[in-house]
Image: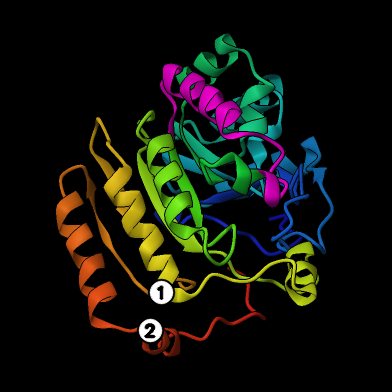
Amino acid sequence: MHFDSQVFRPPQEAYTPLLQVTHGCSYDKCTYCNMYDQNPFGLSSREEITSDIKELASSAFPYNRIYLVNGDPFCLSADKLTWIMDEIQKYIPTVKTFSMYASIRNISTKTDEELAYLRSRGIDILYMGVESGFTQALTFVNKGYTAKEALEQLKRLEKAGIEHSQGVMLGLLGAGRGIETGKENGKFFSQLNPKAIWFMSTTVMPKTELERQRDSGEYIEASEYERVQEIRAFLESVDMKESTYFNSIHPTNTFNLEGYLPEDKEKMIKQCDEVINDYTQDTFQKLFNRNKNSRF
């Protein structure tokens, strides 16, 4: 198999076979990210893709799903994605569905008709890191789109019938902005129907623009206590119309929550309140040492 660098995939796809079709990230300009520093963006050749598909097929296992990697394979054109799915089903006819990482920009490059067609071919969910529904936060970390633009594209995706699972970063704007950001994120997601929302914490990574901003004093990291307050503000603000899985179970988080919205909303708010009321900021900060040398 042609894997040329570290592969990232969501836990939900832990048992799904992986097929590399791109290298790195097609954008790679977010100020907090160093995931693909050693892996410039590029496309796998048709020869490599076909060779890897044949290798998967040689196991004779009746795979029913394939996960495409790397950073954001949905950046590929609808025609290229169609060719890949055709090639997979040519050699592994048992495969019926496909998934991958994607970005807001990837959706915007496809027409409504193309999105609907890709869904009909088996792309049933995209895993995304919208990171925030607050334009100030998105602008600060150079995501390349506004909250309004993200909302428009995600509604197009939902209209096409493609589900999406969304990552949100706590503490993105730094100290003192958590409650405000949490409320804005709640308003944002109240207008959507994601399959899942998962929270992780902004972690300053080596050799990133965010590290430079922190070291120069332009950016002050949010405390762990503030991050719990941000989760609570989100939960209080959000009004999901359909059942959505929510969790903050991530190595970068101090406080782990899991449940469904709206069903478990009040229960999770109560859990946040127990932490906020039972610990001082200093005590809570000592519970978790952010590892600045790890990848989130």
| Residue at the image position 40 percent from the left and 88 percent from the top | 287
The amino acid at mark 1 is Tyr
Dot 2 and dot 1 residues touching (CB under 8 Å): yes
Magenta segment includes 145: yes
Q: Is residue 274 left or right of residue 225?
A: left
Nearest to the observer: residue 158 or residue 53: 158
Marking on residue 244: none
Dot 1 alpha-carbon crowd within 10 angstroms: few under 14, some 14 to 19, many 20 or more = many
Q: Is residue 101 left or right of residue 274?
A: right
Nearest to the observer: residue 207 or residue 70: 207
Q: CA distance from mark 2 to mark 1?
A: 6 Å
Q: Secondary structure at mark 2?
A: helix
Magenta stretch: dominant secondary structure: helix
| Residue at the image position 82 percent from the left and 47 percent from the top | 41
The amino acid at mark 2 is Phe
Magenta segment includes 146: yes
Q: Determine if residue 241 is in view.
A: yes
User: Residue 190: where, in percent of width, then height?
Assistant: 35, 33
Q: Determine if residue 62 is in view.
A: no
Q: Is residue 91 left or right of residue 72?
A: left
Above-or-below relation of 118 to 97 = above
Which residue corresponds to mark 1?
A: 225
Which residue corresponds to mark 2?
A: 284
Image quarter (top left, top right, bottom left or bottom right) of the N terminus: bottom right
Above-or-below relation of 295 to 199 = below
Image quarter (top left, top right, bottom left or bottom right) of the C terminus: bottom right
User: What are the residue bounds of the magenta stretch?
Assistant: 139-163
